[in-house]
Amino acid sequence: MPTLNPDTHACIGAGICTNTAPSVFELNDNGLVRLRTVDVDPADVEAVDAAIAICPAQALAWAQG
Ligand code: SF4
């Protein structure tokens, strides 16, 4: 399964990813992105791609390798 590598230092807590792919992303107590799951269900890949594309902080990326 594909995995994600969010950059919590870059995240500005805009919450767009949590609205776009709510089964994958949530906000932690500090209002920054946190993964709900390490392994992304293939059914959620399209929504995650959309969240990556629109994150204003470019804080989201698929893990490499
Ligand atoms: S859309 Fe980007 S900046 Fe906003 S909460 Fe998600 S990772 Fe953080």
Image: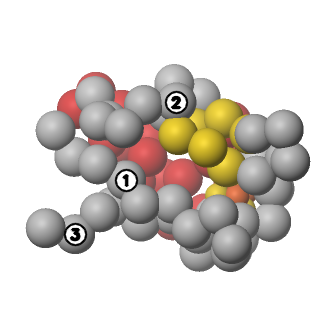
Q: Residue 32: horizontal and vertical position, in percent?
A: 76, 52
Q: Which residue appears at 52% of the width and 30% of the height? A: 36
Q: Quadrant of the C terminus?
A: bottom left
- Counting residues from the start of the chain, the first of labels 3 and 1 encountered is 1
Towards the viewer: 47 or 15: 15
Q: Residue 19: horizontal and vertical position, in percent?
A: 68, 36
The residue singled out by tag 3 in the image is 64
Q: Is residue 11 left or right of residue 39?
A: right
Q: What separation in Å lies between label 2 and label 3 (alpha carbons)?
A: 19 Å
Q: Secondary structure at mark 3?
A: loop
Towards the viewer: 6 or 51: 6
Whether residue 23 is visible, yes or no, is yes
Seen in the picture, residue 57 relative to 46 is either above or below; the reply is: below
Q: What separation in Å lies between label 2 and label 1 (alpha carbons)?
A: 11 Å
Q: Is residue 56 left or right of residue 38?
A: right
The residue singled out by tag 1 in the image is 4
Q: What separation in Å lies between label 3 and label 1 (alpha carbons)?
A: 9 Å
* Amino acid type of the residue tagged 1 in the rendering: Leu
Q: Secondary structure at mark 2?
A: loop
Q: Which residue appears at 16% of the width and 38% of the height? A: 1
Towards the viewer: 28 or 55: 28
Q: Which residue appears at 51% of the width and 60% of the height? A: 6
Q: Residue 46: horizontal and vertical position, in percent?
A: 35, 43
- Report if the CB atoms under discs 2 and 3 are less than 8 Å apart: no
Whether residue 20 is visible, yes or no, is no
- Counting residues from the start of the chain, the first of labels 2 and 3 encountered is 2
Q: Which residue appears at 59% of the width and 74% of the height? A: 58
The residue singled out by tag 2 in the image is 36
Q: Secondary structure at mark 1?
A: loop
* Amino acid type of the residue tagged 3 in the rendering: Gln
Q: Is residue 1 left or right of residue 58?
A: left
User: Is the CB of mark 3 within 8 Å of ligand 1?
Assistant: no
